[in-house]
Amino acid sequence: MRIKTIGLRSVVLATLAFCTLFLAGLPTASLNAQDNRPARLYFIRHSTLVGIVNSPEIKIDGRSAGSISTGSYILVERPPGRHTIIVSHWADFGQFVVDVHVNGGESYYYEIAIATRGGGGVLLPSLAGEVGRPMKARVDSGSYRLNVLDAKVGAASVLKLKR
């Protein structure tokens, strides 16, 4: 009887030791694990008479996301990481090119703005309804540019626009 008890105890201890070693070898989940859900990119164009006849085109990573008219927005989902956004218009020889990094599961709000070269001052952006902070572009030679909006302001703006 004593032999069986020692044998059973040895099996239990060996099993516990094996489980401990096995679990110790498993990778642990990182607290900073990347969220693989797509990011939501909103492109917003406020209702205004400034630039009403033109609808600039948005491209992300070389693929068209669509043209945007005043009083509307475009929603695009992209995987987390680095993306290149281009804003251009068929009648314009220039373009606005910016690189952005987006995190999975987050929303980003970009405002289509009128490029004000040569001292356009505060009046034109104010008339266009612009409220965002201008983005620094890799190429800035077109009639349009992007402003980045705070998430709260961007979400409120989307509610007022049509898709």
Image: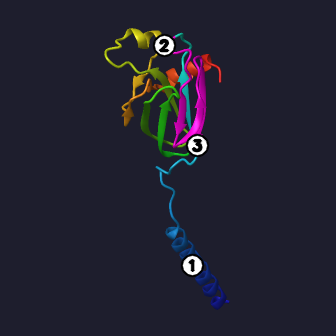
Residue that numbered label 3 is attached to:
38
3D distance between C-alphas at marks 3 and 2: 29 Å
Q: Amino acid at mark 3?
A: Pro
Residue contact at pointers 3 and 2, CB within 8 angstroms: no
Q: Position of residue 84 (x, y in %)?
A: 47, 41
Q: Position of residue 15 (x, y in %)?
A: 59, 77
Residue that numbered label 2 is attached to:
129
Mark 1 vs mark 2, foreground winner is: 2
| Magenta highlight range | 50-77
Q: Position of residue 134 (x, y in %)?
A: 39, 25
Q: Is residue 81 magenta?
A: no
Residues packed near mark 1 inside 10 Å, few (<14), some (14 to 19) or many (20 plus): few
Instruction: Say if 62 sits above or below 117 in the image.
Output: below
Q: Position of residue 76 (x, y in %)?
A: 59, 36
3D distance between C-alphas at marks 1 and 2: 72 Å
The label shown at residue 13 is 1
Residue contact at pointers 1 and 3, CB within 8 angstroms: no
Which image quadrant for residue 47?
Answer: top right
**Going 43% across and 10% down the picture, which residue do you hit?**
126
Instruction: Say if 136 sits above or below 15 in the image.
Output: above
Q: Is residue 76 magenta?
A: yes
